[in-house]
Image (cartoon, rainbow, N blue to C red):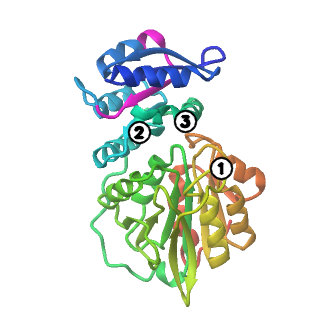
Amino acid sequence: MQGSKIRVIVVDDSALMRQMLTTILSSDPGIEVVGTAPDPLVAREKIKALNPDVLTLDVEMPRMDGLAFLEKLMTLRPMPVVMVSSLTERGAEVTMKALELGAVDVFCKPSDIAEGGLMAHGRELIDKVKSAALARVRPLGDRPASAAPRLSVTTIYKSTDRLVAIGSSTGGVEALRDIILALPADSPPIVVTQHIPPKFSASFAQRLDGLAAVRVKEAAEGERLVAGHVFIAPGDRHLAVRRSGAQLITHVYDGPLVTGHKPSVNVLFHSVAEACGAKAVGVILTGMGRDGAEGLLAMRQAGAATIGEDEGSCVVYGMPKAAYELGAVERELPLSRIADEVLRLCRADGARG
């Protein structure tokens, strides 16, 4: 970053929205809005002239498709982008694609903008921009292709009675996509908590389900955790795991924020430590803050294998770093090696080391 302030360009087709976003961001002494643009074509010239640290980008704009602009940006001039989206089905779908293309985070426009709702969420926007400024953004590279057609679930992993729990935040949508698309159809059951807005988690799960060999769905209350399935926490509910006789089932519930989040990675990891003990693998991926560190430590102390994404492949080396410093991470690995290591650990003969 140039100087002591984070330099931001705000891109939105609404003049009122540009003004409000500028007012919010400028209220923080660590941020300077150096320019605004009504569409991607103007934004392109502003980026060249002003060299910002972070871009806020409206999901739906005229003149040029926002996704096409983002894809070109991430290919030719990668930079941290925070998407600004409405809480609609269409907005969620487009935003999830944007996150897959490399956008760092998403800020949801509240429904009561006219009544001052946007200003009330100002701190959230400021925090997301500050987190984005710390992100490592790489050029848009090749992505995993759609997986092979789904096969019937075999007993290779099912017989080991292992459960995999994954937690992630900033940059996690892209990281989770890479891991889940690398899994075979007979993978062990996987539970995921990703910090994501309400309504977006369902769209995220649906997109992955259409690409992956495993089944991917937004978790609901009381579902059996079976091989070949990935369960993603709803964006406004905690996901935990509990036993019902010999079976593991989901527990999805409302409640207060834990470690500043709902869903909370700590909630998931603590529940897996209690329900599964050594019959689990815990993975903590890219993200800002320290949610998941204490829970992953509980998993390790219960005998589970634990993996942290290494600094070199993280978009934001916050959550994995906090877990590592706490002694919760048994082994750090680059993102490209995590799926294979998880599967190795879940095989009946998978040795630690």
**Picture coordinates of residue 44 (x, y %)?**
35, 17
Q: CA distance from mark 2 to mark 1?
A: 36 Å
Q: Nearer the viewer, mark 2 or mark 1?
A: 2
- The kind of secondary structure element at disc 3 is helix
- Residue 74 visible, this angle: no
**Picture coordinates of residue 133 (x, y %)?**
57, 29
**Picture coordinates of residue 121 (x, y %)?**
52, 37
Q: Determine which residue is flagged by label 2.
A: 112
Q: CA distance from mark 2 to mark 3?
A: 20 Å
Q: Residues within 10 Å of mark 3 (few under 14, many from 20)?
A: some
Q: Which residues are magenta?
A: 47-60
Residues at circles 2 and 1 in contact by the CB criterion of under 8 Å: no
Q: Nearer the viewer, mark 2 or mark 3?
A: 2
Amino acid under disc 2: Asp
Looking at the image, residue 278 lies above or below residue 206 = below
- The kind of secondary structure element at disc 2 is loop
Towards the viewer: 162 or 347 = 162
Which of the 4 image quarters holds residue 181? bottom left
Residue appearing at x 64%, y 14% in the figure: 3
Magenta stretch: includes residue 49: yes
Q: Specify the label residue 320 is tagged with.
A: 1
Residue appearing at x 69%, y 56% in the figure: 293
Q: CA distance from mark 1 to mark 3?
A: 18 Å
Outermost residue to the bottom: 245
Q: Residues within 10 Å of mark 1 (few under 14, many from 20)?
A: many
Which of the 4 image quarters holds residue 162? bottom right
